[in-house]
Amino acid sequence: MMKLHWSPRSPFVRKVMVAAHELGLADRITIVRTVVAMAKPAIELLPENPLGKIPTLVLEDGTILYDSLVIMEYLDSLAGGGRLIPREGMARFTELRRHALANGLLDLLILWRNERDKPHPLPALLDAFAVKANSALGAIDAEIDAIAATPVGIAQITLAIAGDYMDFRFADLGWRDRAPRFAAWLARFRERPSMKATPVVDG
């Protein structure tokens, strides 16, 4: 069994678990509840991930992988390769670029939330996060039909998790008004068994 340092609230961990379910590998992963926070390093995690971040995957032979994209690519290779990330050509780079857009939105949202929840957040930073989020949502909405026409891969998984994370942490954002096509696609993608098997839990 592989061991995954895990939290039910982490969108980056959820990316890995959705990928594992899509690839039929979830039953080969044992999850280990690991609490991490910016202001409180997870000391027990540092020997396996010097950055103290999740997801961190420990393979059967003790090899350690971290970063959600690295782990997803490993799982894809374990399942034969080419299922979540095209093997070569422009299709591969397009998938990686779309993933970068979705993952960048997730990064932005987490930084935005951290700033928003400070006792004295900086208005200029909050405004900058809002501008960047709106820009990202516009780009996603413009491309979502083309993305939906491709096989499910790292881009679609990460986009779905970003949409769910906005609902989870930014309930008043009203993002669906800015990205209605993305919202309609997300409603359909949420019905996939891999998404239902990995609910976000605030605990």
Image: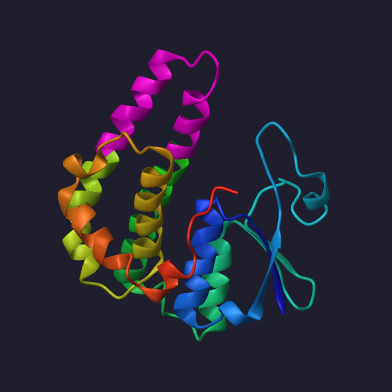
How far across and down, in percent of the image, does residue 121 sit? 49, 16
- The correct choice, above or below, for 149 with respect to 202 in the image is below
Q: Is residue 125 magenta?
A: yes
Count the marks: 0
Figure check: 126 above or below 109 = above
Q: Position of residue 148 (x, y in %)?
A: 23, 67
Establish if 75 lies above or below 176: below
Residue 134 location, x and y as percent?
26, 35
Is 131 placed above or below 23 here?
A: above
Can you name the residue that lies furthest to the bottom here? Answer: 80
Q: Judge from the rendering whether residue 140 lies leftward or rightward of residue 164; answer left or right.
A: left
For the magenta stretch, what is the residue range? 109-135
Q: Is residue 89 left or right of residue 110?
A: left
Residue at 72% from the left image edge and 46% from the top image edge: 52
Q: Which of the two residues, 145 or 86, is positioned nearer the viewer here?
A: 145
Residue 181, how many percent across, how many down?
Answer: 16, 54
Residue 39 found in image quarter: top right
Judging depth in this view, the residue of 54 and 180 nearest the camera is: 180
- Residue sitting at x 38%, y 70%: 153
Q: Main secondary structure of the magenta part?
A: helix
Q: Is residue 116 magenta?
A: yes
Q: What is the basis of the colouring in this image?
A: rainbow
Q: Residue at x 79, y 77 (%)?
A: 61
The quarter in which the N terminus is drawn is: bottom right
Q: Is residue 15 left or right of residue 99?
A: right
Report whether 104 appears left or right of 34.
Answer: left
Q: Residue at x 75, y 70 (%)?
A: 63
